């Protein structure tokens, strides 16, 4: 979803992991070994995300709130959905614009696009770290997301390979028989592709196309 706003993905060819060792910048062990490098990595990502702007796909999802009760469950750590106008966004992997204390994960603050460095501390004196979920850490919003899926009347999946767990398993919580759409130019790893409507386009084109269709249906 964010790639069409100019933000690099993590796993695709040319993505962020190609230039960095995952173990160095996205694990607790990497943080303990070289926190300054980890902070620099996320400072760069935070600055880029802050400068990016929502594209037509983000705006189309926000527009759906005029006719539907829309909940977004995202693996992206930027705030593009919120900035496009969406009001119900569940961030599975954290948020780049936020930092938290290493001593108390509940001490979180929003710093926008600002950088943090060693010596920047929270109210409890704990060093600030990125408010993102690293490999091996718990995904605190997974339960929240899992509770939302069984309530869905329509499921839309955008721009994901469906191979990264535990997030990929969330689609299994959606009720059977509801309309299911997947928007991706590639062929995702679907359990049962017979129940999915596949729009083989990038998010910037495919999401507005589907949103227009759903808005027209709702107005009939």
Image (cartoon, helix red, strand yellow):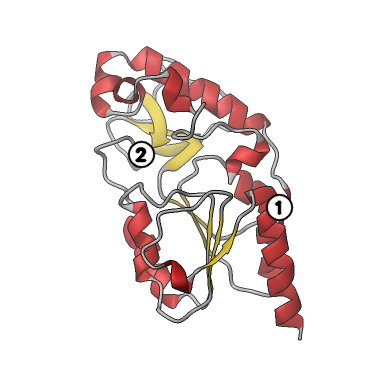
Q: In screen coordinates, is 31 left or right of 14?
A: left
Please give the residue where the numbered disc 1 appears in the rendered image.
Answer: 205
Marks 2 and 1, how far apart at CA: 29 Å
Quick one: label 2, few (<14), some, or many (20+) residues within 10 Å? some
Residue at disc 2, secondary structure: loop
Picture layout, residue 127 above or below residue 161: above
Please give the residue where the numbered disc 2 appears in the rendered image.
Answer: 133
Picture layout, residue 72 above or below residue 94: below
**Residue 190 on image: x %, y %:** 40, 60
Is residue 113 visible in the rendered image? The answer is no
Q: In screen coordinates, is 107 left or right of 184?
A: left
Q: Which mark is residue 88?
A: none
- Most distant residue in the bottom direction: 220
**Residue 185 on image: x %, y %:** 58, 49
Q: Quadrant of residue 52?
A: top right
Is residue 121 visible in the rendered image? The answer is yes
Quick one: label 1, few (<14), some, or many (20+) residues within 10 Å? some
Residue at disc 1, secondary structure: helix
Picture layout, residue 144 above or below residue 67: above
**Residue 192 on image: x %, y %:** 39, 68
Q: Residue at x 68, y 73 (%)?
A: 214
| Nearest the eye: 188 or 16 | 188
Q: Residue at x 35, y 67 (%)?
A: 172
| Nearest the eye: 68 or 18 | 18
Q: Residue at x 40, y 52 (%)?
A: 162
Q: Residue at x 48, y 34 (%)?
A: 12
| Nearest the eye: 152 or 119 | 152
- Do the numbered discs 2 and 1 sit on residues whose CB atoms are within 8 Å? no
How many numbered marks appear? 2
Which image quarter is the C terminus in?
A: bottom right
**Residue 157 on image: x %, y %:** 51, 59
Q: Tag 1 or tag 2, which sits nearer the N-term? A: 2
């Amino acid at each position: 979803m964010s790639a069409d706003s100019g933000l690099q993905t993590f796993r695709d060819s040319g993505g962020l992991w190609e230039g960095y060792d995952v173990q160095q910048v996205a694990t607790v062990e990497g943080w303990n070994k070289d926190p300054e490098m980890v902070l620099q990595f996320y400072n760069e990502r935070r600055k880029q995300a802050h400068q990016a702007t929502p594209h037509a796909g983000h705006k189309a999802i926000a527009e759906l709130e005029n006719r539907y009760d829309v909940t977004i469950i995202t693996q992206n750590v930027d705030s593009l959905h919120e900035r496009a106008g969406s009001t119900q966004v569940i961030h599975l992997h954290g948020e780049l614009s936020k930092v938290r204390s290493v001593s108390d994960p509940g001490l979180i603050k929003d710093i926008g696009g600002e950088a943090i460095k060693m010596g920047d501390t929270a109210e409890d004196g704990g060093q600030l770290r990125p408010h993102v979920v690293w490999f091996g850490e718990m995904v605190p919003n997974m339960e929240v997301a899992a509770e939302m899926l069984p309530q869905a009347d329509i499921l839309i999946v955008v721009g994901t390979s469906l191979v990264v767990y535990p997030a990929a398993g969330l689609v299994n919580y959606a009720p059977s028989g509801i309309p299911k759409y997947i928007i991706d130019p590639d062929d995702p790893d679907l359990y049962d592709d017979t129940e999915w409507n596949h729009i083989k386009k990038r998010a910037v084109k495919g999401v507005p196309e589907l949103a227009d269709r759903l808005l027209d249906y709702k107005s009939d």
